[in-house]
Image (tube, rainbow, N blue to C red):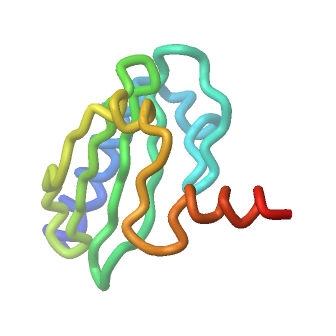
Amino acid sequence: MRSVMFGVLSVACLIGIVVGSDAWRDRLHAQQPAAHPQGELIALNSDVEEGRQQIVVIDPKSRVMSVYHIEHATGVISLKSVRNIHADLLMDEFNTDSPLPKEIRAILDQR
């Protein structure tokens, strides 16, 4: 019971910190990010494995994203990754599997 309560409080605290106000219910939509004013954080959550939740926090202003995992049983929050995505968004293409974007363009250009 104690660990479940700790887990619930941990998730609530993380969401409160991420969003920063009681108005988070109007702005937080899992898997459905809406247009946000400049500077507001976006938080997306999903269950990724048995007993684990993932929260992705995106700062559109600084173009940084971070990924957290939360253990349902213990409430332990682990920071898994932080990345500035500015350079990623400047790339014209990046794929690791076929068809590559340039291959798709070549097919479309043949029409």
Q: Residue at x 30, y 85 (%)?
A: 50
Between 83 and 108, the one lying in front of the other is 108
Q: Position of residue 20 (x, y in %)?
A: 40, 25
Q: Position of residue 76 (x, y in %)?
A: 13, 60
Image quarter (top left, top right, bottom left or bottom right) of the C terminus = bottom right
Given residues 32 and 27, the one toward you in this image is 32
Judged left or right of residue 74, residue 110 is right
- Side (left or right) of 22 relative to 81: right
User: Which residue is outermost to the bottom?
Assistant: 50
Drawn side of residue 100 relative to residue 97, left or right: right
Q: Quadrant of the N terminus?
A: bottom left
Please provide percent x and percent y for residue 42: 48, 36
> In the rendered view, would you say 42 is above or below 86?
below
Q: Is 13 on the left-hand or right-hand side of 21?
A: left
At a point 66% along the width and 60% down the height, the residue shown is 106
Name the quadrant containing residue 36. Answer: top right
Q: Residue 5 in the image: x percent, y percent? A: 23, 63
Q: Residue furthest front?
A: 110
What residue is shown at x 14% (from left), y 69% (from top)? 74
- Up the image or down, 86 lies above or below 44; here it is above
Q: Residue at x 56, y 28 (%)?
A: 23
